[in-house]
Image: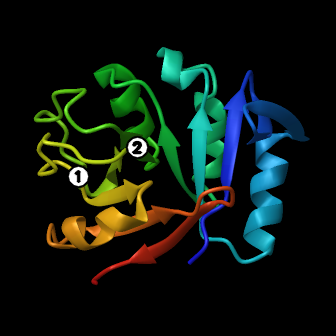
Amino acid sequence: MKIPLIYLKDKQAFTKKDGIMKFIGKPIDIARNLQEQGYRLIHIVDEDALSGLSNNFDIYDSLTCFINIQVECAPRLPLIKKLLSVRARVVLEPGKADLSSINEKNLLVAKIKGKTEASLEDFHDLVLEDEQAIKEYSKSGKRIILYEKGKAWGVIISSF
């Protein structure tokens, strides 16, 4: 399953190449177009939410009515809980937040850059940026989403 990657900032959608963001339109229009193309999940890097802001929350509330989304955000519990309240999957680096008070563990996704010693217990899925790490993390029993460099968030691997 391919998972497209978009960036959000100030309620607008972007792509990013070589560190440069390119405007592509309104997030809801982009998501509807992706859904019509057959995509079932969109990975969103929210530049505002990574700073702890929740100004794009109304967009997520609308998006989750017709497509599944996973949102990278700052490890701040109020923001995490707000995203979970609309059934958005939340992407976090493991070990950055105390997630013990979160009940919706099935919506938590760990983003792993390289190797981590942090516990993955609270997370349902894993996003890996290193293809070499698949074998190691497949032992966790969690679904793995592999980032295909230069493309989009990629294929879900349930076992290796």
- Image quarter where the N terminus lies is bottom right
**Which residue of the protein is positioned furthest toward the front in this rendering?**
132
The numbered dot on residue 91 is 2
Which residue does the image show at 35% across and 66% down from the upper left? 132
Q: Circle 1 sits in a helix, a strand or a loop, which is it? A: loop
Q: Position of residue 108 (x, y in %)?
A: 31, 49
Q: Position of residue 42 (x, y in %)?
A: 61, 57
Disc 1 marks which amino acid?
Phe
Q: Circle 2 sits in a helix, a strand or a loop, which is it? A: strand
**Which residue of the protein is positioned furthest toward the bottom in this rendering?**
160
Q: Earlier in the sequence, mark 1 or mark 2?
A: 2
Which residue does the image show at 39% across and 56% down from the upper left? 127
* Left or right: where 149 falls relative to 113: right
Q: Position of residue 153 (x, y in %)?
A: 57, 60
| Count of all numbered marks drawn on residues in the image | 2
* Left or right: where 141 falls relative to 84: left
Q: Which residue is mark 1?
A: 123
Residue 96 sits in quarter? top left
For the residue pair 158 and 89, the one nearer the viewer reads as 158
Using the image, determine if residue 10 lies above or below residue 88: above
Disc 2 marks which amino acid?
Val
Residue 36 sits in quarter? bottom right
Which residue does the image show at 67% across and 71% down from the upper left? 39
* Left or right: where 39 falls relative to 84: right
- Image quarter where the C terminus lies is bottom left
Q: Position of residue 110 (x, y in %)?
A: 31, 48
* Left or right: where 80 falls relative to 140: right
